[in-house]
Amino acid sequence: MQPTKQLPDEYQEIYSLDLSKNIRAQLILNGVALILMLVFGWFFAGISLILTPGTWPNNLANMLGTSNLVIILAALLLMPVLHEAAHGLFFWLFTRQRVKFGFKLGYAYAAAPEWYLPRKQYLVVACAPITILSFIGVALMPIMPVFAFPGLLLFLSFNAGGSVGDMFVAWKITQYHSNVLINDQGDSFIIYGKSSGEKKQFEAR
């Protein structure tokens, strides 16, 4: 299947989630994201110890210096930009049309609201930030200057933790048949399928 702007007649909505209306879902996802940031922070710090074993013991004081504050702030500001850019890159590669970007309190987004994407392609879009940015960050560890290490680790842990919504979406669409189509509005995503027997599983609260 290929991305399409025209939903086939035999398709109907079988699941939707609208974060702009579901504050409870926002709070849950953000809470899980904070926990995962700590977990991934420990994970990436462990990887850095393996790839650069002398960095932490010999340069810990330099890493914690106040001069690194600018780099840390830059990493935190850059993370959502690159995260959504990774989504946007693959939206563009699949649709060849301009991607919609936005930011609201609690989350940022990239979207292709006019398009319906097949499951495999949407999985690539959803998983792009955590896979590509994590790979690049880990690859940079052996050549990263010591003073930039805190910023890199924060970037990686915040990006991975901030992917909790992406991972939820990826998990959700794998629960349905491979022929489903997904429409991403930024605030919300909707799954469409052929089966008339499947009921809508979400109700905004």
Image (spheres, helix red, strand yellow):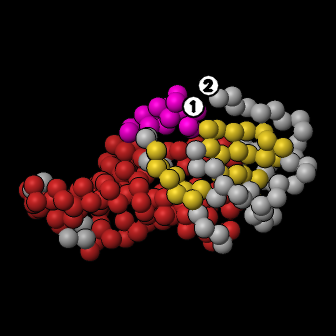
- Residue that appears at 18% across and 59% down: 70
Residue 99 seen by the camera: yes
Q: Is residue 94 rendered to the left or right of residue 86?
A: right
- Residue that appears at 31% across and 48% down: 42
Dot 1 falls on a residue whose secondary structure is loop
76 or 174: nearer the viewer: 76
Dot 2 falls on a residue whose secondary structure is loop
Residue 90 seen by the camera: no
Type of the residue with mark 2: Arg
- Residue that appears at 68% across and 68% down: 95
Q: Main secondary structure of the magenta part?
A: helix
Quadrant hosting residue 113: bottom right
Quadrant hosting residue 98: bottom right
Q: Is residue 159 rendered to the left or right of residue 18?
A: left
Percent across and percent down for residue 40 are: 37, 48
Residue on which disc 2 sits: 205
Disc assigned to residue 22: 1
Q: Residue furthest bottom?
A: 143
Q: Is residue 23 magenta?
A: yes
Percent across and percent down for residue 79 are: 37, 57
Structural crowding at the residue carrying mark 1, measured as other residues with C-alpha within 10 Å and reported as few (<14), some (14–19) or many (≥20): some
| Quarter the N terminus occupies | bottom right
What stretch of residues is rendered in magenta? Answer: 19-35
Q: What separation in Å lies between label 2 and label 1 (alpha carbons)?
A: 6 Å
Callouts 2 and 1 close, C-beta under 8 Å = yes
Q: Relative to 58, does residue 145 appear above or below in the rendering?
A: below
Type of the residue with mark 1: Asn
